[in-house]
Image: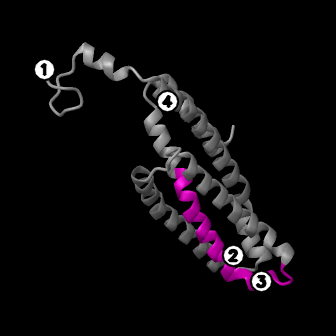
Amino acid sequence: MPREGFPGEMLTVQNVETANELSPEDKRRDNRDKLIYPMQQLAHGVMQSFFSTYLNNLMTLVYIFPIGVAGFVEAMGQALGWVVGPVSGAMIDRFSFKKSKYWPWIIIGSIGGATCWVVIFILPAFVSDPTRMVIPVAIIILVRAMLEGPDIAVGNILYARLARDGKLRSYLAMWGKIGRDGM
């Protein structure tokens, strides 16, 4: 009989039962990850819904970006996000930290993105003429798109890894929807 995990393995009841059993360490990791995914989705959704809603007004009314420049910066941020997402996923798959595989990436993405949002929104209070900050703010917006890539990629990786059965898939999809769209 072929050994488990090899191509061409015949699926028997015994193989399926063995494959479905998890060690206590794997069960603990899965339970921890079941908490990470909803928290990450909810935090990312709150950040996106609050800050991105007001970003266009901030760029055009406070920093006095020309409308075309504001649109270009937003489009470049989105395009950068499309590139950074898959690259972040590949990095996360290949690199792991000593204590954890996903937490450091969530921390890098969440804290980095949140810091960029905060800097963008509080900068006008510390500068006498915010219109002179157009280029630095545009750069911060692009850096934010790059820093949030690992955070988003971790959410996608965790969902794919955790969603093994229908009930759990529904639970995770619910939290993904709440994080993305609100209640």
Q: CA distance from mark 3 to mark 4?
A: 47 Å
Q: Which residue is mark 3?
A: 131
Kind of residue at badge 3? Thr
Point out residue 109 in the picture as x, y percentages from the top left corner: 59, 56
Mark 3 or mark 4: which comes first in sequence? 3
Q: Earlier in the sequence, mark 1 or mark 4?
A: 1
Numbered badge on residue 137:
2
Q: Nearer the viewer, residue 134 or 116?
A: 116
Image color mode:
one colour
Question: Badge 2: how crowded within 10 Å, few (<14), some, or many (20+)?
Answer: many
Q: Which mark is residue 169?
A: 4
Q: CA distance from mark 2 to mark 4?
A: 39 Å
Q: Which mark is residue 1?
A: 1
Type of the residue with mark 1: Met
Tell me if I can see residue 17 in this picture.
Answer: yes
Q: Amino acid at mark 4?
A: Arg
C-alpha gap between disc 1 and disc 4: 33 Å
Q: Are marks 2 and 4 in contact (CB under 8 Å)?
A: no
What are the residue bounds of the magenta stretch?
127-152
How far apart marks 2 and 1 lie (CA) works out to 63 Å
Q: Residue at x 45, y 64 (%)?
A: 83
